[in-house]
Image (cartoon, rainbow, N blue to C red):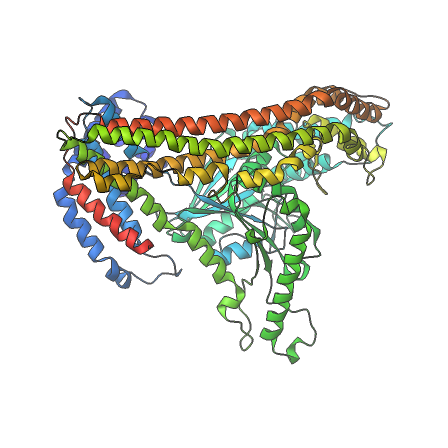
């Protein structure tokens, strides 16, 4: 927490709020941007809140535009020289603010000041509208890069190499299969921080059910000595958390305080925050929450490993600009057996704009695991997600398994081997029909990297290791410039409307302009509606075919799931027990996930995959939804040329189009995930009673009876549940179309009315601020062009 906020709270007689503001990392920059909702969330006490709001308003008002303009100018003029004056950095991209970041900061300050100048009196609708517009200016979306790879593939080394820090531990400890680790920039202070998010106490308690199941196992269907996956997995977790004392743990003393002295936050259902001065220090501490010892705790009898209790770890690296808007996520390979962790895993995978599949270069094609991960998750990332880039990253490219390597030019051998590996991986990618249903070849790239330096005299050029290429990709994904441009463009539009309203006089052509805009809006909405309706017709046809195929083949598809060749009857007993108790989904410790719901829905999803990808491409730029929205325009530029007297308000309408398009595209991106997954979720709902009934079956021949229960249920409902799944998806598509059109119409209609039909009394004069933001806007546009 910086001294500015501490001093202000003390000065205002609000020192009791210091710890609260520190916990939310409020600093000098962010305090000016607090909106009414932020203040309500921070300060529950009405009296304290009233004092704070009054003092903050006065503080903003004292930052008069005339005083801040000279300060901002000096900062921008010194921007180029400040880099040379800064002390040397350990990491080459820990820099002072870029020009675009300086502009963003200054424009935010301007808009905070303008907001305080907009009174709550008179012009109620217009003033409320303007404040909402300022509050909604910043819609920053973090880009997620999901990193998959088995233990030993080099994930941690890759992430460390990309960020230039030995941050994630590797080597002496083994990565567990459950902890998700996010890495992002800490833009608020110079500390290395980690937030540990735990599973709930209820979820931890439920880890005990395999013991109960083991004790009550039906001997007729299960060998007495056999320990199933869930049982062994639970033993591993309990021994990690409780050490050798796990054998004495039962549900009554599961949450004994003495077992959680190091993590009292778990018992209180709170996050734990670790703060360190260096990456090395944080790495040494965080390992206890993400990994487990490989040496059977030799010499570390009292050491506890808390990864079984952890849902997610978020690590923040100070002042690392490349991750300001990007988060790297070290992901477990194929979800998790814990429901809570699996849910967050699916959410994150579905939100990744980029996925890195990491594997050893010498096994890039032959090893099954990376390809199985890609195939099993492709529907979550593709039609059910927003992934635009798949990067297959071959690590350890500096190693040559050739006894005669010393006799040759090693760099030459490496480059040839790497080129062959790239071609082989691309060829393998092209073989998977399932992956290609969701991604085109343009989305797929192969990189060969090494996080280590080559021996002297045998070095490759830096670019040939391709780590720099990945860094360049992250810089592009981060793209602070475009985010700043979007913000400043919106601010420019709002200030144009305010100034246009504040100096408004009778305008002869005002109503004529309104009439033209409203007619144009009707025509543009018709243009948007037609492609959406055509897409709906295409889905009707695809889903009808999918329903017919599902009804005719569902029972045949179910047989290998209920009678797998790879397990005999007694061995499959425990597995099917897990499946029915987990709503048709089970992740064995080894092997592929079993998902009856997804298997039954597969004919439906296969029938629409191609059409879905065409309708909702993840680039968000084309298709009958995003594509036509991108072309939506009221042609305000042409109107400005004809009606200079309303230019300022038409400028606002132009930026308003951009803002509304952006919000609609975000809404479509999120809702299309739900639409795609609706086929499987509907099947799961129809199968729910069947799973509950099967889970209650015990005694002799229970395996046979469970199989029979599932088969009879599917046979009975097959003519109903597939049709229902089709109808629900079509309904959701219709709702999306109608909601999109409604939002587009109502938002633009409201903007037209408030900008051209509302009187502008009590509106502040923002001529100076508008001129300044316009200058910034032109600078950014010129740089972009």
Q: Give the residue at x 29% y 22%.
A: 45
Give the answer, above or below, for where 78 lies relative to 455: above
Visible residue check, residue 320: no
Q: Quadrant of residue 345?
A: top right
Give whichever of 541, 206 is nearer the camera. Answer: 541
Counting from the top left corner in percent of width and height, residue 137 is at 32, 37
Give the answer, above or below, for where 1 lies relative to 149: above
Counting from the top left corner in percent of width and height, residue 350 is at 54, 39
The reply, left or right, for residue 520 in relation to residue 209 is left
Q: Give the residue at x 31% y 39%.
A: 635
The reply, left or right, for residue 614 in relation to residue 586 is left
Give whichever of 39, 243 is nearer the camera. Answer: 39
Counting from the top left corner in percent of width and height, residue 92 is at 39, 61
Q: Give the residue at x 20% y 38%.
A: 643
Please identify the residue farthest to the bottom as the structure is shown: 407
Counting from the top left corner in percent of width and height, residue 53 is at 23, 28
* Quadrant in which the N terminus is drawn: top left
* Quadrant in which the C terminus is drawn: bottom left
Q: Quadrant of residue 409?
A: bottom right
Q: Give the residue at x 68% y 47%.
A: 433
Give whichever of 729, 711 is nearer the camera. Answer: 729
Give whichever of 348, 441 is nearer the camera. Answer: 441
The reply, left or right, for residue 47 in relation to residue 406 is left
Give the answer, above or below, for where 735 lies relative to 481: above
Q: Quadrant of residue 377?
A: top right
């Amino acid at each position: 927490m910086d001294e500015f906020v501490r001093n202000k709270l003390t000065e205002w007689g609000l020192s009791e709020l210091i710890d609260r503001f520190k916990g939310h990392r409020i600093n000098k920059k962010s305090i000016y941007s607090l909106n009414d909702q932020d203040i309500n969330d921070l300060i529950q006490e009405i009296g304290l809140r009233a004092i704070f709001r009054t003092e903050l308003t006065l503080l903003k008002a004292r930052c008069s535009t005339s005083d801040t303009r000279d300060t901002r100018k000096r900062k921008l003029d010194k921007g180029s020289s400040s880099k040379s004056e800064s002390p040397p950095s350990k990491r080459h991209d820990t820099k002072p603010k870029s020009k675009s970041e300086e502009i963003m900061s200054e424009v935010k300050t301007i808009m905070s000041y303008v907001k305080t100048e907009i009174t709550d009196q008179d012009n109620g609708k217009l003033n409320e509208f303007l404040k909402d517009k300022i509050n909604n200016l910043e819609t920053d979306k973090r880009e997620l890069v999901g990193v998959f790879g088995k233990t030993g593939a080099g994930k941690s080394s890759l992430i460390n190499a990309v960020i230039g820090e030995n941050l994630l531990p590797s080597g002496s400890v083994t990565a567990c299969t459950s902890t998700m680790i996010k890495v992002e920039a800490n833009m608020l202070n110079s500390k290395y921080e980690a937030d540990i998010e735990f599973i709930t106490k209820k979820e931890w308690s439920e880890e005990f059910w395999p013991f109960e199941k083991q004790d009550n196992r039906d001997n007729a269907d299960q060998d007495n000595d056999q320990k199933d996956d869930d049982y062994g997995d639970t033993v591993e977790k309990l021994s990690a958390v409780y050490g050798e004392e796990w054998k004495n743990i039962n549900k009554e003393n599961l949450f004994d305080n003495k077992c959680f002295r190091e993590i009292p936050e778990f018992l209180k259902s709170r996050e734990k925050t670790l703060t360190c001065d260096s990456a090395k220090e944080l790495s040494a501490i965080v390992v206890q929450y993400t990994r487990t010892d490989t040496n059977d705790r030799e010499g570390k009898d009292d050491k506890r490993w808390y990864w079984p209790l952890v849902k997610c770890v978020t690590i923040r690296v100070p002042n690392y600009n490349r991750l300001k808007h990007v988060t790297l996520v070290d992901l477990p390979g194929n979800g998790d057996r814990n429901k809570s962790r699996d849910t967050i895993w699916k959410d994150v995978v579905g939100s990744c704009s980029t996925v890195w599949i990491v594997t050893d270069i010498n096994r890039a094609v032959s090893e099954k695991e990376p390809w199985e991960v890609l195939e099993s998750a492709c529907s979550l990332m593709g039609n059910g997600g927003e992934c635009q880039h798949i990067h297959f990253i071959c690590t350890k490219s500096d190693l040559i398994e050739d006894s005669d390597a010393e006799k040759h030019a090693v760099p030459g051998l490496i480059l040839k081997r790497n080129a062959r590996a790239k071609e082989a991986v691309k060829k393998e990618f092209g073989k998977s029909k399932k992956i290609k249903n969701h991604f085109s070849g343009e989305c797929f790239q192969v990189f060969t990297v090494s996080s280590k330096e080559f021996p002297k005299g045998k070095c490759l050029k830096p670019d040939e290791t391709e780590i720099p290429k990945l860094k360049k990709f992250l810089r592009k994904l981060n793209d602070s410039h475009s985010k700043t441009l979007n913000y400043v463009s919106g601010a420019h539009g709002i200030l144009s409307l305010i100034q246009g309203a504040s100096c408004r006089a009778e305008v002869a052509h005002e109503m004529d302009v309104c009439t033209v805009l409203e007619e144009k809006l009707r025509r543009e909405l018709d243009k948007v509606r037609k492609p959406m309706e055509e897409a709906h017709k295409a889905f009707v046809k695809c889903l009808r075919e999918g329903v017919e195929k599902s009804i005719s083949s569902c029972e045949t598809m179910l047989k290998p799931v209920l009678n797998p060749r790879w397990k005999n009857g007694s061995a499959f007993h425990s597995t099917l027990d897990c499946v029915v108790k987990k709503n048709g989904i089970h992740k064995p410790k080894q092997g592929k996930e079993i998902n009856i719901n997804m298997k039954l829905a597969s004919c439906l999803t296969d029938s629409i995959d191609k059409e879905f990808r065409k309708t909702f491409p993840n680039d968000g730029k084309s298709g009958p939804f995003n594509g036509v929205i991108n072309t939506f325009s009221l042609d305000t530029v042409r109107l400005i040329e004809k009606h200079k007297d309303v230019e300022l308000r038409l400028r606002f309408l132009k930026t308003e189009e951009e803002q509304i398009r952006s919000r609609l595209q975000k809404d479509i991106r999120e809702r299309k995930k739900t639409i795609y997954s609706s086929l499987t979720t509907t099947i799961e709902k129809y199968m729910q009673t069947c799973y509950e009934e099967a889970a209650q079956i015990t005694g002799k021949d229970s395996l046979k009876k469970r199989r029979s229960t599932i088969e009879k249920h599917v046979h009975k409902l097959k003519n109903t549940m597939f049709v229902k799944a089709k109808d629900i998806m079509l309904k959701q598509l219709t709702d999306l179309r109608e909601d999109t059109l409604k939002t587009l119409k109502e938002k633009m209609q409201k903007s037209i009315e408030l900008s051209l039909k509302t009187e502008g009394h009590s509106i502040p004069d923002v001529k100076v601020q508008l001129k300044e933001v316009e200058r910034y806007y032109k600078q950014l546009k010129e740089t972009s062009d």
